[in-house]
Amino acid sequence: MPGAHPAFVLDVGGSVTDAELASLLDDVFVKPGHTSPPVAERLFAPDRVRTRGTLIAAREPETGVLLGMVILVAPGAAARQISRDDEAEFHLLAVHPDARGRGIGRALVGAGLQLARTRGWSRLVLSTQPQMAGAQALYAEAGFERAPDRDWGKYLAFTLQLEAA
C-alpha cells in the first residue's frame, strides 16, 4: 500500500541500551510475576543478557522504541540452559504487553530460526514457563514440539529440527 509504514522493524545484533533491556524484561517477566525481582536482578543484568548470544530486537520504526526481543544462543555457548553441544537455543523471547497482537513475537521467532539456519545449525531448543500459553502456542505454530524429558525446574522444554537454509 503506498505510504504504508511497517508496524515494526527487526534489528539482528543491533544495539539495545541497558535501560531499554531492563525496562522490557521488567515489563514482560517481573511485573506479571513470572520472575522474582531478586532473580531478575541477577539473570537480567544487561551485560549478562548481551553475552548470551545474538540479540534480535523489534523496534517501532518511527520512534525507535524497543517493542520486543529474543536471544539466539549458539551451540556449545556458556549461556545455554538445556541445549546439547549441537543445539542452538532461544532465550528471553519478550514482547512488550502494549505491543502484543501485532505479529512481533512471530517475526522474532522467524528471524531467529532463519539466522540459525543460515549459520548451519540443525536443531533449536527453548524452555518456557507453563503459564506462558501464548508463547507456547507461538512455538507450536513455528514447528516446535514439546520435549518433556528435557523439562527442568518449573520450565517446559521444546525442540525443533531445522532444515538447511
Image (cartoon, rainbow, N blue to C red):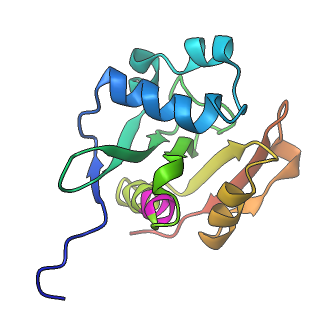
Magenta stretch prevailing secondary structure: helix
Which stretch appears magenta?
A: 104-110
Does 35 appear in magenta?
no
Question: Residue 109 colored magenta?
Answer: yes
Q: Residue 3: percent from the left, percent from the top? A: 11, 80
The one nearer the camera, 92 or 152, is 92
Q: Nearer the viewer, residue 27 or 39?
A: 27
Residue 56, x across and y down, in percent? 36, 46
Q: Is residue 144 above or below residue 155?
A: below
Residue at 66% from the left image edge and 15% from the top image edge: 39
**Quarter of the figure with residue 69:** top left
Looking at the picture, how far across and down is residue 94, in whole percent? 52, 44
For the question of whether residue 106 can be seen, the reply is yes
Give the residue at the far left of this rendering. Answer: 3
Establish if 83 lies above or below 113: above
Q: Indicate left or right for 23 with 32 as reference.
A: left
Q: Quadrant of the N terminus?
A: bottom left
Q: Nearer the viewer, residue 69 or 27?
A: 27
Quadrant that contains the C terminus: bottom left
Q: Would residue 76 be visible to someone looking at this image?
A: no
- Residue at the image point whose x is 66% and y is 11% from the top: 38
- Extreme-front residue of the structure: 98
Residue found at the very far right of the displayed protein: 149
- Please determine whether, in this image, residue 164 is positioned above or below residue 82: below
